[in-house]
Amino acid sequence: MGFMKRFRRQKSPKNKGLQSRNGAYLTPTYTGPDNTRRLDDKILRRIFEEVCPHTTDDTYDGSEESGNDGCMTCDMRDLGHCALVKRQWYGVAAGLLYKSIRIDAVHYCELEEVFQEERKRKSRGGDDIDAPTTRLLQLCRTVRENNYIAQRVRFLKLPYMTRESNKADLARTVSVLPNLEYVDLPDGFYSGDSSCHTLRQELQARCSHIRKMRYTDGGEQSFESLLQGYWQELRVLEITRIRIEPSVLRRVFGILPWLTEVSFSDLPGLNDSVFHSAPGIPDFPALDTLRLKKTKYITAAGLEQYLENGMCRDTLRKLCIKDCAGLPVQDLHKVLGMATSLQTLEYTATVSTSLPIDPIPPLTSRSLRTMNYEIISNASNQLYPPAASYYSYLTNSLMSSALPSLRHLYVRDPDFPESLTLAPPVRPFAADGGGPPPRGFNQQLEVFSKGLDELEWVFTSVIPADAYGRRGSLSGGRPLSSYSASKGLGPQWGGDARKSIVVPNGFGGFLAVPADNERPRSAGNLGPGGGGGGGGVRASWMSHGKRSSRADLWR
């Protein structure tokens, strides 16, 4: 019997030192020196920015346009826990926690379902609790009770329904935020709605550092109130569908010394006179970004007059033109010729007729690096869509080396990258004498293309040839076709996107090279045996009319 009792005896724990007197077990703790004390505030700030990435969002984009990957609400909770760890961390973490505040309607993670059920149980009468409104009220209480935190708030971004239905709470919140630079406001604020009168008064009286403001139809009086000295630090100004005299517009611009970006949209009364010099009226300011949308009476002559000013010409970096009848493609070369410091051009137009047959000078710019050239035909049933002539004009400009600094090109033509590969070959020794100089690219070009029925861009990289049509630096190695899952194509590619590399063939043309030990495959033949069999790639391409097959460069 005594021998059998040994098998029934309870085994003693291996770590006897971790057992307390009352029988409970203690988890091991680190008892060495605290190395985190050696971290200065700069390193701690960088670590906390990785914990909560959206705290680094210092853009003036609204809640719907800005954001980061992951759940911003959970990231803010984790950063709040970091602030409570020790006194050394509180100042750094609190400074980030309240610098750029973002209130989201939901958790962008699996916790949203759990919290939703908890809200239903806690709510009265079965109604759901409005979580964003609750968070706004908590923020309002915090900043009104703690002046130190209130002075740190610079950005406040809210969901649409929260800012529309809580105007009074938003007014009480911004009234104690003296260093606020951007806040999401209800639509009535921009149009002069009387329901936003209290909010407008608080923002004008308490928040003098506002950097972005928008005015829409009905907000003419609010726009003229800028002449009284409100918001002298405005950087970005959006003007949409308001009726205002050009002289008043220029006087408002004249008292905003920090203005860098102006957007005009749907202004039927705006014409080239806004750029004209007049005695007693401030000149149109030198801007970093100018956006024009549906301003049919602004022409290339007006922009040329604006760019005649040396300061304006040297300052303008980005020009966006969308659906402006007074700025057709055939006049675009005039603007590019004057904008000597322009780095980004966005041009969008819907055309019904082709370009005239008269020769047009190519698009020429030595500073342009990024170009959005989106031409859409409004008559899609035609055999020859009008947009084809516009893209041919762009191809000729590229092949004539008129855009030597261009690196990124966005087009709304799915076949545009392939049209570049079909450029006529160049004689190897044409540049030595007796013949015209070779046509082609002098820089590596990244082309992003998509059709009208597509949502994502297809990326293609074009590597230039040298003067003799050779690959130059790539001649020593064989470039491989590469796929990427980060740009955003459909599942037919096995991921989100695809990258393609196009290299010269040694004779002035281009050659697509497949990967080693692998036959080229089309997008419509992605099965295990898609690379083999009779017909193979070409049969798959001929039998499928998908956009992905037309974009395949390996067929």
Image: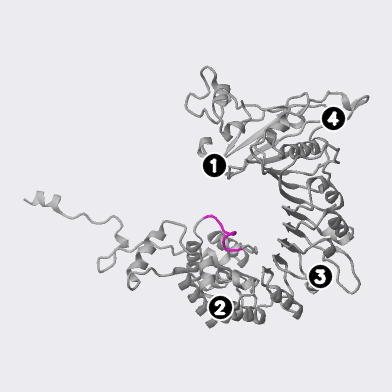
Q: How crowded is mark 4: few (under 14 residues within 10 Å), some or many (20 or more)?
A: many
Could you tell me residue 321's position as x and y percent? 74, 53
The residue at the point 61 percent across, 66 percent down is: 40
Residue 210 percent across, percent down from the top left = 68, 73
Specify which label sits upstream in the sequence, 3 or 2: 2
> Are the residues at dot 1 and dot 2 in contact (C-beta closer than 8 Å)?
no
Say which amino acid is labelled 4: Pro
Tell me if mark 3 has few (under 14), some (14-19) or many (20+) residues whose alpha carbon lies within 10 angstroms of its own: some
**Which type of secondary structure does the marked residue at label 4 adopt?**
loop
From the image, tell me which residue sits under label 3.
Answer: 250
Residue occupied by mark 2 = 173
Q: Earlier in the sequence, mark 4 or mark 2?
A: 2
Residue type, mark 2 in image: Thr
Q: How far apart are marks 1 and 2 (CA)?
A: 42 Å
Query: Horizontal placement of 305 versus 168: left or right?
Result: right
Q: For the point 69% across and 40% down, which residue is it?
A: 447
Magenta span of residues = 62-69
Q: Report which residue position mark 1 lands on.
A: 496
Q: Is mark 1 on a helix, strand or loop?
A: loop
Q: Give how far apart the Cα atoms at labels 4 and 3 are.
A: 48 Å
CA separation in Å, label 4 and label 1:
37 Å
Q: Is mark 3 on a helix, strand or loop?
A: helix
Task: Give the residue type that dot 1 points to.
Answer: Asp
Q: Distance between the residues labelled 4 and 2?
A: 64 Å
